[in-house]
Amino acid sequence: MSANPAAEESPPPKTPVKAKAEAKAGAEPEPEKIQKVEIKGSTAAYDPRRDDTASKIVVSNEEIVRYGDTSVSDVLKRLPGITVGGGGRGGNDIRMRGLGSGYTQILLNGERAPTGFSIDTLAPDSIERIEIVRAASAEFSTQSIAGTINIVLKKAVKSAQRELKVGAGKSADASNPFANLQLSDKLGALSYSLTANAWRYRYDRQTPTEDTRTAPDGRVVELRQSRQHDRGSPQGVALNARLNWTLKDGDTVTWQTYGNTQQADYLGIEAIATPVGTPPRSTDRTMRDDSRNTFGRSDVNWVAKLAGGGKLDVKLGTHWMRSRGLWEEQDYHGATLWRDAAIRSSTRERAVTTQGKYSTPLVPDHALSMGWDAGTSWREDTRVERDAALPGALPDNSDEGYEASIRRLALYVQDDWNVTPRWSMYVGVRWEGIDTTSEGSTFDQVRTKTSVWSPLAQTLYKIPDSRDQLRLALTRTYKAPAANSLIPRRFTATNNSQNDPDRRGNPDLQPELATGIDASFEHYWAENALLSAAVSMRRISGYMRQGLFLDPNGRWVSAPVNDGSAVTRSVELEAKFPLSAVMKDAPGIDLRASVSRNWSRVEAVPGPDNRLGQQTPLSATLGVDYKSRDSKLTTGASFAFKTGGPVRIDVNQTGYQSVRRDLDVYAVWKFTPQYQLRMAVSNVLGQDYFYDNAYRDASGVRRRTGTYAGYPQGRVTLEMRF
């Protein structure tokens, strides 16, 4: 198991050889020349994918920026074992083992991303690496039933760097100009890095939907067809700054700040035709939205070297978020305006966090560490609605607000033990407690306290006289309810129905608990060549799903509920190798492929298709990269595929997941060491996104379907170093 890669500059874990060499050096100093050769050789031989006790995939910055993506979601969709949900129009759901909706943990520099933070506000150029961790460890939060994706921002400064990238993307319904600046240098004991990026995204597109209601005998008794035209122009800027000081005693102090600000203007016009049945109350609607969002995060990290080879790593941080919005809506029934509303909303969140870890080589061949992770956050939310006084209408003028605070504390201890040079073990235990308090103008104070113990064990065995190795992990993880899932505040729908219900939280919601097992086999058969096979299973209790019910006022309401147990299983296969591993004098071609097959079953929901969290059953990736011998041309392609199909959500509700085929291509031409041109095309196949939601009961079937048109998008980026 590795140390926290987000908090340290050097490779976090130690190979068995390195651990023993350092223990020996601590007991009796060796000549300086021999010591330098040992450390250099050990560091060069270290491979986190191969040598860490925990199963981990590390994606370098070079791989991250290869396609010139402007969104982290686009980067992740090409990685093995990861799928990205949604229709490509925001709200992308990042999934491991096909599971999203909170099952996959997203970390930023080793810490859970704050509520409301979107990883797509990060510029891929600002990321140093992405770590994909299949099995949980005590050092990170164990809210990771499916696994963890840790996004580490740039921090290591090896040499002076000045780089400017300017580019633009264009598709049939959108355009996306962007710019990115990176600066870094060393000034004696001080080093710094700065990344700034700006972007704008303009879109103009249609979003058609269709609602049908069918009687038990199959007759269509209601048909509504919506034509919606959406137009908007979100834009934003982001800044990531880092300062590193190396003190005389070898201690280091690091200050890092990340911030972004965004604004978005939106105009939507909807017209609903009703060829069959009764028209809804709102047949025509005009919607305008003007929103502003600012997010910032700052922390100071001190790493102190202690006597006897120990180390203390302490971090103190804060983050803040502020968003404001104005939503204006005019609803018509035919030519009659019956609602003219303006809704102003404001959200403010502040938080203070602290992390710490003490590690010591107290026993030979052991890396013992213990630490804490704590924080407090405060959130204020206000909503003011003002309706115009129209003939025959009852204005809904309301002032709503609520406040919430979340206090969390986690304590852990872990040990990495090199049993033999070929066998390592990791054991750890983590306790996490969360205390949430909320109160508002429309509900009484609600307080929820939960805590979870997570014992963990992992092992790595390198088979003698071969390049093969085996891994095994036993974990206990959980999924905590999101804060807004606990607050009983209601959000109403204009045309309330089973497919468009009101929504509210459930203060009685409890965490899901999962016990899991992971096993894998890895075969390293040449330099940079890997074949691997991994299997896993999770048994979950307290399964959370969205319930749907009819309240006493005759309105449909959706709220999260705990409902029994579930089980999920996965098989993952991966291969990556240079063509030179199978062909002598081969060109500079690298190949990679992966396949993930997932199964799950929710006990309380009748089958078939009763998949956990609307799990993706099958996903696969295939990629090829080529670099010319003179390194002037680099090109490649990536194909990502995921299946879909029907999903049984509960006894009455079903959904449909769209099949997705993403083909992306890129090419980079290096004119000089200072200038290069990067060109890419994403969604080459013009893949559309289709959804289908249905509610069935004794009165028949109510269904909503829709299609988001997809178009290829081309991007051109000029990259300059100076």
Image (cartoon, rainbow, N blue to C red):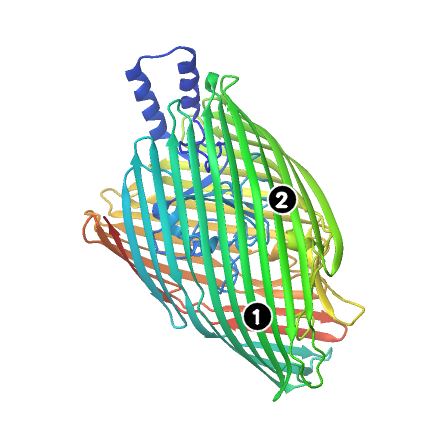
State the image quarter where residue 402 is shown.
bottom right
The answer to whether any part of residue 275 appears in the image is: yes
Tell me if 689 is positioned left or right of 549 in this view.
left
Work out whether residue 586 or residue 140 is closer to the camera in this orientation and state it: 140
Q: Which residue is mark 1?
A: 327
Q: Position of residue 692 (x, y in %)?
A: 59, 69
Tell me if 363 is positioned left or right of 664 in this view.
right
Q: Which of the numbered marks, if any, corresponds to residue 571? A: none
Tell me if 658 is positioned left or right of 717 in this view.
right
| Mark positioned earlier in the residue sequence (1 or 2) | 1
> In the rendered structure, which amino acid carries the disc numbered 1?
Trp
Q: Judging from the image, what secondary structure is the residue with disc 1 in?
A: strand
Say above or below: 98 vs 111.
Answer: below
Q: Position of residue 269 (x, y in %)?
A: 53, 78
Badge 2 crowding class, 10 Å Cα cut-off, few under 14, some 14 to 19, many 20 or more, is many
Tell me if 217 is positioned left or right of 665 in this view.
right
Tell me how far mark 1 sits from mark 2, CA to CA.
42 Å
Q: Which of the numbered marks, if any, corresponds to residue 538? A: 2
Viewer-side label of 1, 2: 1
Work out whether residue 113 or residue 69 is closer to the camera in this orientation and state it: 113
Query: What residue do we see at 53% from left, 76% from top?
Result: 208
Q: Position of residue 377 (x, y in %)?
A: 61, 46
State the image quarter where residue 645 is shown.
bottom right
The answer to whether any part of residue 113 appears in the image is: no
Q: Judging from the image, what secondary structure is the residue with disc 2 in?
A: strand
Say above or below: 721 vs 286.
Answer: above
Q: Position of residue 404 (x, y in %)?
A: 66, 51
Find out whether the residues at labels 1 and 2 contact each other: C-beta distance under 8 Å. no
State the image quarter where residue 337 is shown.
bottom right
